[in-house]
Image (cartoon, rainbow, N blue to C red):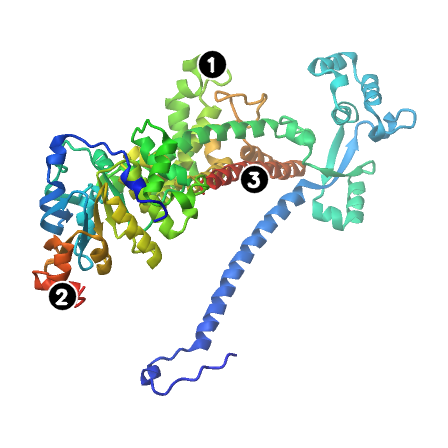
Amino acid sequence: MTQPLTQSSSTPANAEFQPNLQLRHRNSRIWRKVFQISTIVGLISLTLLLFNITNTAFGYVAYQYRLDPASLALDGVSLEDMDQAQLISVLSQNISANALKGLERDKPLLQRSEAELRSLISQRITRPKVLGVWNLFDSLTRKAEIEAEALAIDPEARLEFKSWLTRDFITSPQDADPLWTGVWYAINGSLWTILITILVAFPLGVAAAIYLEEYASDSWVQRIIQTNINNLAGVPSIIYGILGLALFVRVLEPLTSGAIFGLSDATTANGRTILSAGLTLALLVLPVIIINAQEAIRAVPGSLRHASFGLGATRWQTVWHHVLPNALPGILTGAILAISRAIGETAPLVVVGASTYLTFNPNGPFSKFTTLPIQIYQWTSRPQDEFRSAAGAAILVLLILLLSLNAVAILLRNRYSRRLP
Amino acid sequence: MNHPASTVTTIARPQTHTLESAEQYAIEARNLSIYYGDFRAVKDVNLQIQKQKITAIIGPSGCGKSTMLRSFNRMNELVPTAWAEGEVLYHGQNLYAPDVDPVEVRRRIGMVFQKPNPFPKSIYENIAWGARINGFKGNMDDLVEESLRDAALWDEVHDKLDQSGLSLSGGQQQRLCIARAISIKPDIILMDEPASALDPIATLKIEELMRELVQNYTIIVVTHNMQQAARVSDFTAFFTMDEDRAGYLKEFGHTEQIFTNPKDKVTEDYITGRFG
């Protein structure tokens, strides 16, 4: 407790002040705690989320093998320790000549890595079947019970610790078997879609923001437009999905299916393409990008504009040389947030017509598509536990993708804003 | 000043046609009223600015000094509701005529602001940018050096031209802004309280600089600082305001006369510090 300072008695007006320091300081401390707790709650939620995802993406799996991997051992060398040549000889001894020829045609066996060969042996020869899945937390804490449970399902069951997030998982297409399924097509679909979203929404949004802030006069028309943009930012994303379905898939089908460019093929001629999805997401994030860009432009000090106009610059020269470079970090921050939201969007893409099962790699704007969130959504709605683990791994992929895209954007932004002293 | 005064006087300035030089005034306001929406900020001003002299505009806060100053190069128009009535004659041409381009006006009539506002670019770019956007085709390095020399800044910055303009001190920043303003060869330089954000020593440097610049330029300066007006200006215009808050020109004359022998009682009261 601090000592109260002695007051000069010659200043009678002081009697009217009752500083009440203790109460004021206590209020400060209470509010400080409130703010601290809010931050901690946020941190806990984030940790729980990460824990939950990791928990499903790793853990024990009980397998039943069609053919015991131990029986494939050559000269006492087990499958895990074999080199490439030995793995190839195992393969050629255990599958038919025709199947072998097919594999050679896809990619010569000699060019395949040991990991690829092992996964081939697993898929074609030993063919494990999943009997049960356990999460990471249980796997670490109650191993003995899990072993008992696995044996109760099948006395032949083999328990192995499996990471569902593997290189194979990332580079494989979707598969009906959860063990061999992957997210490669979904990653490509997501990247293509977001590329189109960025290409459309970023320039349009920034241009609209420049117009509204620098050119439009303060009339009632402008105020109505502004109010509408603010409201559009709050419209549920599924509504944008319906708009995308009506506009891009139906009305603009010749464009979005690529028919007018002569690029459509029979499988994609219905407008349910990456282009439609990207445009729909662009509409979704456009208001957010506009509002953020407007804020950033408004934050550029007026003195800078005056300096520019005072030198006989036109409005465009002022905007291009001074307003935009100084607003760019803010504009990019807003755009990064908006694009991040778009990457995770599921609902509008379901409406626009994302494919549930894609048999080829999305390879351009006029391709049919699926995206990571769609893939995750489908896997989580399957009854089998294995797909839930695959979904967990896919969520990790989505998070990594999101964080890397953001990191690139932030690096670009920092690099650019450092160039402006 | 850090350099001999001769460098200032040797600036190559295009001495244009006889018609211009025959004219008496650099710029002249005739019956000029300036409005913000319905509000009349300045009313019925008739003011003649002498060539190659410093004219100071003084007066109490809110009397429309800055508004008046900005009307000379149409910077007022950056406020969306601002409009003007009357004429501002420059080389015999009304700047408010419909066919006059404010962009061209601002190149001929430059401006220095109250708060130093260099661009967040290098010192070199701060000078070069204005020239470049105005289609300067000569040697840029020479122009930058000449402008910085004329603004008495060259000796302090010649070895760090690639550093940010914002890395300079306040006084240096303001001289950079002056260098920037003169780089595009204006006729007239408007200064809106150019030293009010600076310390006394930096202020003194700016004032010395103004005295040197006036050998080649016409300067109009708004100032709150009476001593500054008395020290640097050749002419002084005293503005005050009416009951309806509209500012108007109360008295105009040689600075010496205004400060030693004002004709108007209000002027005298203001100058002697009895109000304002």
Placement of A178 over or under B222, stated as above or below: above
Q: Tell which of A160 and B64 is nearer to you.
A: B64
**Label 1, label 2: how far apart the Cα atoms are:** 85 Å
What residue would you read off at disc 3? A403
The residue marked by circle 3 belongs to what chain? A
Q: Is residue A344 above or below residue B67?
A: above
How packed mark 1 is, by other alpha carbons closer than 10 Å (few <14, some 14-19, many 20 or more), is few
Q: For residue A271, which quarter of the picture?
A: top left
> Disc 2 marks which amino acid?
Asp
> Viewer-nearest of labels 1 and 3?
3
Label 3 packing within 10 angstroms: few (<14), some (14-19), many (20+): few
- Residue under the image location 40 percent in, 17 percent down: A254
Describe the element under mark 2 as helix, strand or loop: helix
In this figure, what is the number of numbered marks?
3
Protein chain holding label 2? B
Front-most of residues A110 and B10: B10
Tell me the residue that label 2 is attached to.
B269
Residue A85 appears in the figure? yes
